[in-house]
Image (cartoon, coloured by chain):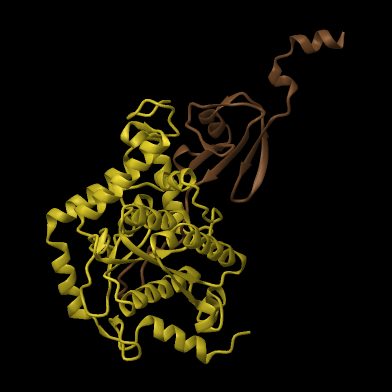
Chain colours: A brown, B yellow
Amino acid sequence: MAECVLAILPMSALSSPMQVQLSHPARTVEVKGPKKVKDLLRELNLVVEAHLVIKGDDLVTEDEMLYDADQVEIRPVISGGSPHVPPHGSRLTSQK
Amino acid sequence: MNCTKCKTKAVIGLPRHNAAFCKSCFNGFVHDQVARAIKSEWMFGKEERILVAVSGGKDSLALWDILLKLGYRADALYVNLGIGTYSEQSHAKVTKFADAVAASHGATLHLHTVEQEAGAGIKELAQLIHRPTCSTCGTIKRYQFNRVAIEQHYDVMATGHNLDDEAARLLGNVLHWQEEYLDKQGPALPASVAGFAKKVKPLYRLSERELAAYAVLNRIDYIVEECPMAKGSKMLQYKEVLNRLETESPGTKQTFYWGFLEKQSKKQPTATTMAEKDRAVLHPCTSCSQPTTAEVCSYCKMMARAKALPIS
């Protein structure tokens, strides 16, 4: 009986969910695949313009399909905390 | 998604250019954007010596990498701010890049350690003199980068400010109507008075996401963590707002900043005016000789206060 149940389940239902590594703060979340990159970002409420998605060691585009077996990192790209108000007389008003 | 140029599998889509690129064509795109910035703003030539301000982050390390690959004579300066493990990690990233990549191009890494001179890290120093940490950091970095550029006879100092940095700063200045700062928001500031190095921003045509992608694709090991002192900063808030607009309407950031630059260039001969203004208000600091509007520059005042007070 068990064999019959397994036979009709899709393969994705048998594997563990996709491990997605996030930053700021560093954490890992599980997301069920298959899922397109743009849908993964939307599901996590992350803005495309502020993130890169890395599958294994490779950068992937928004239309790429991600599966449960994939190791995925979503890396934020925003940096910098300099004041926009420069001190009087300064030449550079912010620093990298 | 396939590469717009060579039709192989793309690794990044660029909605603002209605394009997608494979690694090789993307590197070509990035190098071309930097070359166009350098040429159009008369930043520097192949014979000039450039000092790159590096922090261990993606932008400054990408800038150093790109300049070296384009054949420029680019050395770098790293200022260790003494922010605990964050500074230790960023210092290690810079050293690793200098050894693994820059050294093979004959480039040198200079180092300045805040703790050695001030007796404390940036956080303690800011507390001691009752100033915001980011403001203290800005004063120290500006001073040290300019000092090294002048003392070591570099022709120009280059920073890793990108399109997002400049658009966010412009938004902040416009929101608060700080018109007096707009003149100095261009990608190239001349060496207007003796003691000031020329300063340029060769990455102003590239977005933060594009530079992060360049670093990932070219295996540049940079510090991903945010500076712990920057949390909640206004700049980060402006960037988040602009990125939401950019996602809905690609090209918003470049239209905003590049449009501003175009209007500024038509308004007046900025470089001449800026130099005239600087010459009228700046004179050498009585303590260190760097240009300042006051008798003693803000860096010397800060250091004098720090040295006069005991560090707990």
Quarter where residue B41 is shown? bottom left
- Quarter of the image with the N terminus of chain B is top left
Residue at the extreme right of the image, as rendered: A1
Q: Is residue B198 above or below residue B172?
A: below
Residue at (52, 57) in percent of width and height: B232
Q: Is residue B70 above or below residue B305?
A: above
In x, y percent, where is residue B215? 46, 48
In x, y percent, where is residue A5? 80, 10
Is B64 or A73 nearer to us in this picture?
A: B64
Residue at (67, 38) in percent of width and height: A29
Quarter where residue B10 is shown? top left
Is B266 or A68 nearer to us in this picture?
A: A68
Residue at (72, 20) in percent of width and height: A13
In x, y percent, where is residue B97? 49, 59
In x, y percent, where is residue B157? 32, 67
Lateral position of residue B124 relative to residue B6, left or right: right
Residue at (33, 31) in percent of width and height: B18
Q: What is the tally of numbered marks visible in this picture?
A: 0
Is B120 or B45 nearer to us in this picture?
A: B45
